[in-house]
Image (cartoon, rainbow, N blue to C red):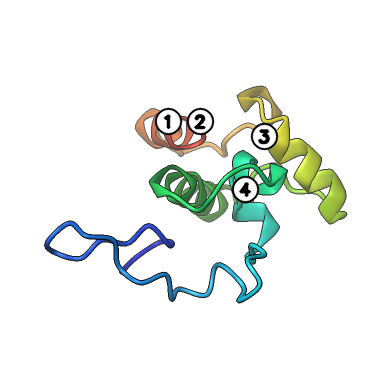
């Protein structure tokens, strides 16, 4: 199961970009809370790195109960994502292993 748009066929060639992450007119689509800083800023294309960011956001959401850098207003959430600093993340709930925390921090780079 692919997490994003940088899918490869078994022979290593790029697969088709049909995951719905990019509109026909080239605009990026997706849930802001899971978009990487370069995608929110508009200077990047979907990649393995942006997929890793989204995966880190998903794990964080599963463990904390909300996406990282959450804000009610999309514009504020976009600002937090573009200017990401790991100090912005809430403390992890008791019981979240140090290994899980390290994985999330490694994915959100």
- Mark 3 neighbour class, 10 Å CA radius: few under 14, some 14 to 19, many 20 or more: few
> Is tag 4's residue or tag 3's residue first in the polypeptide sequence?
4
> Is tag 2's residue or tag 3's residue first in the polypeptide sequence?
3
How far is mark 2 from mark 1, CA to CA? 6 Å
Residue named by callout 4? 39
The circle on residue 90 is 3
Q: Secondary structure at mark 1?
A: helix
Give how far across and how far down residue 39 sits, in percent.
62, 48
> Is tag 1's residue or tag 4's residue first in the polypeptide sequence?
4
Q: Secondary structure at mark 2?
A: loop
How far is mark 4 from mark 3, CA to CA? 23 Å
Residue named by callout 2? 109
Total number of numbered labels? 4
Task: Identify the residue at horizontal 65%, vertical 33% (top origin).
Answer: 89
Q: Position of 14 compared to 61: left or right? A: left
Q: Secondary structure at mark 3?
A: loop
- Mark 4 neighbour class, 10 Å CA radius: few under 14, some 14 to 19, many 20 or more: many
Q: Are marks 2 and 1 in contact (CB under 8 Å)?
A: yes
Residue named by callout 1? 106
How far is mark 2 from mark 4, CA to CA? 13 Å
Task: Identify the residue at horizontal 66%, vertical 72% (top origin).
Answer: 25
Q: For the view shown, which residue lies furthest in the front direction? A: 25
Give how far across and how far down residue 92 sits, in percent.
57, 36
How far is mark 1 from mark 3, CA to CA? 16 Å
Comparing 70 with 35, the one in front is: 35
Q: Position of 49 compared to 66: left or right? A: left
């Amino acid at each position: 199961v692919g997490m994003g748009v940088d899918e490869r066929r078994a022979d290593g060639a790029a697969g088709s970009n049909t995951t719905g992450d990019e509109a026909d007119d080239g605009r990026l689509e997706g849930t802001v809370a899971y978009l990487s800083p370069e995608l929110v800023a508009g200077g990047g294309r979907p990649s393995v790195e942006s997929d890793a960011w989204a995966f880190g956001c998903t794990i964080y959401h599963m463990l904390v109960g909300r996406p990282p850098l959450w804000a009610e207003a999309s514009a504020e959430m976009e600002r937090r994502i573009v200017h990401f600093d790991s100090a912005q993340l809430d403390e992890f709930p008791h019981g979240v292993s140090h290994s899980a925390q390290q994985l999330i921090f490694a994915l959100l780079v």
